[in-house]
Amino acid sequence: MVARQDLRAKEAIEVAGCLSVQMSFLRAHASVPLARALIRGVVGAWKFDRPLVQDIELVASELCTNAVLHGAASCLGCFDVRLAPQPRGLRIEVTDAGPGPVDRPAPSALAENGRGLLLVSRMCESWGVDATSDGTVVWAELRTDAA
């Protein structure tokens, strides 16, 4: 399933019974809140607990923001988000056409940004970055005993 910006959220969240959902977004700042809203709808349809839904939204928002700020757009100008339920949680993958992680200095104490992946690492059971032949996949797995 590919959700483009012109699809309505209602059409994109009819996912009961899906093994995973993949959505493509334009690599633009305006895509981050759209991605977050569609992700909220999808994981809500999968009946995840509200606290986990909020964590999923935040982690996905951080990964999408990084794809917009630091990634590279595919030939279509997009980045992809894939959601895959796990036996005890959810795996989020954000793929862009960029070459992979770049060592960035730690943010200063007064910096207003630069802590997104630190937040992801604290909220998730595991996360990582995988290089592919088409770009980079940043993934995160959130867990709950209730899932």
Image: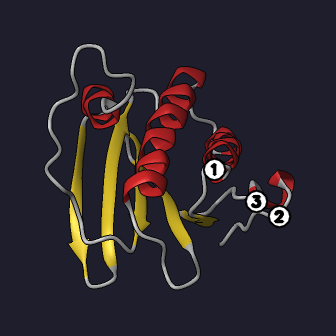
Residue labelled with disc 3: 12
Q: Earlier in the sequence, mark 2 or mark 3?
A: 2
Residue drawn at x 76%, y 63% is: 5
Indicate the position of residue 133 as horizontal and vertical percent values: 26, 85
| Residue 82 shown left or right of residue 139 in the figure | right
Q: Element type at marker 2?
A: loop
Residue drawn at x 77%, y 57% is: 14
Indicate the position of residue 107 as horizontal and vertical percent values: 22, 27
**Is residue 142 positioned above or below 101 on the image?**
above
Give the Cα separation between the discs numbered 2 and 1: 12 Å
Residue labelled with disc 2: 7
Q: Amino acid at mark 1?
A: Ala
Q: Amino acid at mark 3?
A: Ala
Give the Cα separation between the discs numbered 1 and 3: 11 Å
Q: Are marks 2 and 1 in contact (CB under 8 Å)?
A: no
Q: Earlier in the sequence, mark 2 or mark 1?
A: 2
Residue drawn at x 40%, y 57% is: 93
| Residue 111 shown left or right of residue 73 in the figure | left
Callout 3 environment at 10 Å: few (<14), some (14 to 19), or many (20+)?
some
| Residue 144 shown left or right of residue 22 in the figure | left
Q: Amino acid at mark 2?
A: Leu
The number of callouts visible is 3
Q: Are marks 1 and 3 in contact (CB under 8 Å)?
A: no
